[in-house]
Amino acid sequence: MTLNRRLFLGTLASASAALSAPMVWGQAKPHVVVIGGGAGGATAARYLMKDSEGALDVTLIEPNATYYTCFFSNLYLGGFRDFDSLGHTYGKLADMGIKVVQDMATGVDRAARTVTLGNGDVLNYDRLVIAPGIDFVDDSVPGWSLDVAEVMPHAYKAGPQTQLLKSQVEAMPQGGTFAMVAPPNPYRCPPGPYERISMVAHLLKTNNPTGKILIFDPKENFSKRALFEEGWQKHYSGMVTWIGPDLGGANVEVRADTMEVIVDGEAEKVDVCNVIPAQKAGMIAATAGITDDAGWAPVDPASMRSKSDENIYVLGDASAQGDMPKSGFSANSQAKVAAMAIRGELTDSRVFPARYSNTCWSLIAPDDGVKVGASYEPTEEKIASVESFISETGEDAALRKSTYEESLGWYSGITADMFG
Amino acid sequence: MTGRRLFLAGLAFTLGLAPGVKADPLGDAEHGATLFKRQCAACHQIGPDAVNRIGPHLNGVFGRRLGGLDGFRYSNPMQQMGADGTDWTIERLDAYIENPRGFLPGTRMSFRGMTDGNDRSALIAFLRDWSDQPQDIPESAPTATRTEPQLPPEILAIEGDAEYGEYLSSECSTCHKRDGSDDGIPSILNWPEEDFVTAMHEYKSRLREHPVMQMMAGRLSNEEIAALAAFYATYGE
Ligand SMILES: Cc1cc2nc3c(=O)[nH]c(=O)nc-3n(C[C@H](O)[C@H](O)[C@H](O)COP(=O)(O)OP(=O)(O)OC[C@H]3O[C@@H](n4cnc5c(N)ncnc54)[C@H](O)[C@@H]3O)c2cc1C
């Protein structure tokens, strides 16, 4: 029955989608479509396929053949990893039987339960997982848009942007200035901008010791602040200046043509300007009509199911869930809960209570690693933090080194957990 | 550091020439026993009834081939070193204990290392007391026993629900790789269930250090710990 209905709907939708007769896919098994092959989507697809043991058809839609992790992209900036080590492909997921489609999802018809792809194909779904990561909020930093990202990179989606930022830092004149416009909350990877500052400082210390770093920050405070400030003092004394909202950090404009940052009306000439704009859920979430006024997609804390549509789950950065930071670790953790819930619905497998966790490691200097983490549980209203820990200031070098080594283990672990 | 190594290497040579001579070549074995109890005994046994647990037993470790005990699953690099004909000597033990991953990248031994040279020589003196090369095994009762703390038998007796454990394990596999390899975070595959349960309870009660593990174990119930232990005991075999 569902088969016919789906074929029928699929045909209709596709007939209107394009003139060249596009392909229509109908499945006999329940079909889960996953949009986005990142920390949330790749993990969800893998766990759905692995744990359902053939009872589900799983399709993963992702435009890029290689996924470059944002996590550890700062370590690449600092010279601790090569770029290729950040890249991961989808071959093992395809080998498991996941249908990996290299394209963009451009539309979601929730009534018809179909997803339209960039090439015009239309896919039917029983459940849809939306995990597109973030997009940037237009005009959040006046003067900046994606059009000037080649001059003032964001480097907050890993790939060519990250390489561009690194080459700009390396080309900085001696004694030049690196500026970062830090994002307002909420954004992906709360310690990410400050780990990046540490890595840029490390590069400058080696290549350009008279170089300066300015951070313009709209926030009163930031993640792991005491740890970062201690580290900057210790390793990069005098190099880093943080300008918070009381000194104009929330009133910043940029001019790409003159390489200026305008702070409270005063122009500062800089050599590199890393603008990390305000963020919102990846576009397709808004296209699907499941986002709130702030641009994120609210979910049920116990399952990651969209509050707007019972057939849709939202994972990772795009979701509005409560206390979990937007991180790769969180997205991976949420994906496992959603995969279990979806399997339970479609194949009657056992469903266990949701549990979530997160740990974010950051590197401050060679062998100087720190971490912050928490465990979470669903409550009626949100995913709530239960217990947390953070590295302490003044820890000895051996502990910091082992924290860094642990982060290498984590990277290896989570990427294997995502991509097989 | 190098000086210390050379010194130890020299000693090993002297001992080799005069086996059986009970000198006081190394550190304080009694201090070594305390260190063993605190830092090694959660995974390694030593003494008359010692058997392989998470780590291999350490009776007779001096002169033993690396990866040389039958019935223990060593890491590939450890096996490789053994296959290459490497035996445990004082200086190798010293280097390994000082920095396990530096000496043997890829080792499964999840131990950060012991930087204090005096501590290392004390520990080595203690290990040597349980080796017959040199032949000076004392008749005394074992100074080291594992199982700290003693878990109530009813906790150890809980039959784990391995299927639930499989779901719970998805939280572990973000860091602990499912193929058992160790790139900075230890493997937790194929641990004897009792050891797994003991370790988790030690994290839970904060007897073992590690903030992430204390947090993870902290919210696991006795049943959930048993479920994970049941799942991991046979996973990947
Ligand atoms: C500099 C930096 C450092 C970081 N460090 C860490 C860290 O150390 N630890 C940590 O846990 N996290 C870290 N993060 C955060 C982490 O990268 C993100 O939180 C995580 O990637 C979120 O996962 P996600 O699945 O929501 O999105 P992503 O991983 O971004 O994946 C989204 C995917 O969806 C695809 N996509 C988007 N739209 C569509 C569409 N319409 N159709 C099809 N596909 C689409 C994209 O191409 C992308 O591959 C860091 C981030 C940055 C920027």
Image (tube, helix red, strand yellow):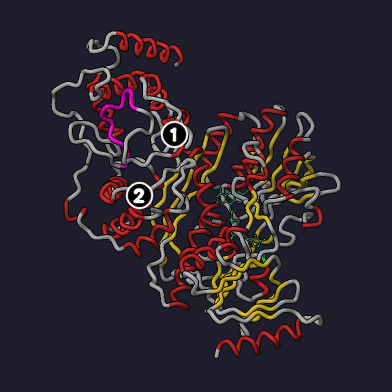
Marks 1/2 in contact by CB < 8 Å: the verdict is: no
- The residue positioned farthest toward the right in the image shown: A257
Residue found 74% across the figure and 71% down from its top = A118
- A146 up-or-down from A228: above or below: below
In terms of image quadrants, where is residue A62?
Answer: bottom right
Point out which mark residue A372 bears. none
Point out which mark residue B190 bears. 2
Please, what is the three-letter code of the amino acid marked with disc 2?
Asn
Host chain of mark 2: B
Q: Is residue B117 among the parts visible in the rendering?
A: yes
Find ligand 1 in the image and state its quadrant.
bottom right
Q: Residues within 10 Å of mark 1 (few under 14, many from 20)?
A: some
Residue beneath disc 1: A399
Host chain of mark 1: A
Q: Is residue A326 among the parts visible in the rendering?
A: no
In terms of image quadrants, where is residue A137?
Answer: bottom right
Of tags 1 and 2, the one toward the viewer is 2
Residue found 66% across the figure and 72% down from its top = A286
**Magenta stretch encompasses residue B219:** no
Q: Circle 1 sits in a helix, a strand or a loop, which is it?
A: helix
Bounds of the magenta segment:
B54-64
In the visual, does B61 lie left or right of B99? Answer: left
Residue B120 in the image, given as x and y percentages of width and height:
34, 22
Q: Nearer the viewer, residue A377 or B193?
A: B193
Q: How many numbered circles does the render carry?
A: 2
Residue A175 in the image, given as x and y percentages of width and height:
75, 29
- A390 up-or-down from B35: above or below: below
Please, what is the three-letter code of the amino acid marked with disc 1?
Leu
Residue A386 in the image, given as x and y percentages of width and height:
39, 57
